[in-house]
Image (spheres, rainbow, N blue to C red):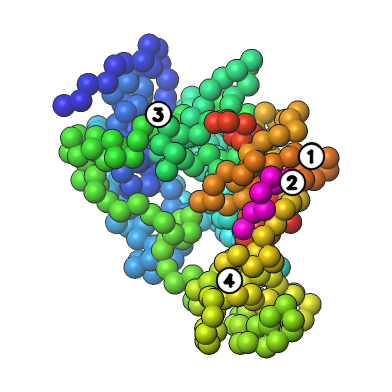
Amino acid sequence: MISIEPVAGASAQHVVVGMSGGVDSSVTAWLLKQQGYHVTGVFMKNWEDADDEHCPARQDFLDVLAVADIIGIEIEAVNFSAEYKERVFAHFLREYRAGRTPNPDVLCNAEIKFNAFLDYALALGADRIATGHYARLAERDGLQQLWRAVDAAKDQSYFLYRLNQQQLQHTMFPLGNMLKPDVRRLAQEIGLPNAAKKDSTGICFIGERPFRAFLQQYLPIEPGEMQTPEGVRVGEHQGLMYYTIGQRQGLGIGGAGEPWFVAGKDMVHNVLLVVQGHGHPLLQREALAARELSWIAGMAPAIQRASAKTRYRQADAACQVDVKDDLLLTFDVPQWAVTPGQSAVLYDGERCLGGGIIV
């Protein structure tokens, strides 16, 4: 069995771990228990849905209970469905209705996992909360800094850029210095029943389901024309809210030549603008503006150069930074499929500075 060195003074600290039933949060709880912390696990139910196929909350909770039994910790279950629908899902639908493509995981972290859940944990008497996110924290000059995880392929700092100092002061990310294969290997050695459980890739708390069919339950179909930049009709769309900039799949445009991509939306005339070829100029952006700014330090960084991510899986891009009322980024190399509603997140090397919503 793997031995973990105890942390001095850990026994006097109560840490509440957000446990989802997945391997990451399970190993997080085990690590903290081994380090000597007083650990309580909390399972959050944040979506009310009878569709167990796509939102298997019952099985997830059973997995949490099985893991807790092996680790030797108490589990509480809490329902944040009302908070999620009010603070996250309503905003999610408003953004799609306006033709933008929001990132619900960013808002879910800020409003549920590190807000409603943090408040709940502190009310339980916790000193801090912990989650299975892949990110690192460091304290410099009395301020909490957010750093990328050691595992670059799993780093989740992009989704955490809206967290503030008060939230980070009460947070731990025990997996930040670990690689995902090592986390799974550790789970197997401990004997956790979910060691090989597949990672969730669906919408935060809603699960993995056919996305367009899910949206249609809330946003009715509004068909319109697909047109080229020259105004040539090449197809029909089902509603501008169902498409995102750079989308290739599901357009249904036949014919020869290069594949088609979504390049823009005309909300006034209900027209979806499409172009042929991944390298089409309308898919490239030399600059962007972002609003609803959030800064880890509580204030805008005094820098003129940084790197930025314009979506989670996109590589960092070097850029010139100008912060006034909005965040203005000018890229050294044009960026592909910059999408309104997504987040532009700034980095100074490994440190996440914050960012905003692309407009």
**Pointer 2 residue:** 330
- Horizontal side of 141 relative to 198 (left or right) equals right
**Pointer 1 residue:** 322
Instruction: Relative to 165, say whether 60 is above or below.
Output: below
- Between 339 and 140, the one lying in front of the other is 339
Q: Residues within 10 Å of mark 4 (few under 14, many from 20)?
A: some
> How many angstroms separate mark 3 from mark 4 (CA)?
40 Å
- Between 338 and 83, the one lying in front of the other is 338
Type of residue at label 3?
Answer: Asn
Residue 166's label in the rendered image is none
From the image, state whether disc 4 or disc 2 is nearer to you: 4
Q: Earlier in the sequence, mark 3 or mark 4?
A: 3
Residue at (65% x, 64% y) in the render: 283
Type of residue at label 1?
Answer: Asp
- Horizontal side of 222 relative to 84 (left or right) equals right
Type of residue at label 2?
Answer: Thr
Q: Residue furthest top?
A: 8
From the image, state whether disc 3 or disc 4 is nearer to you: 4
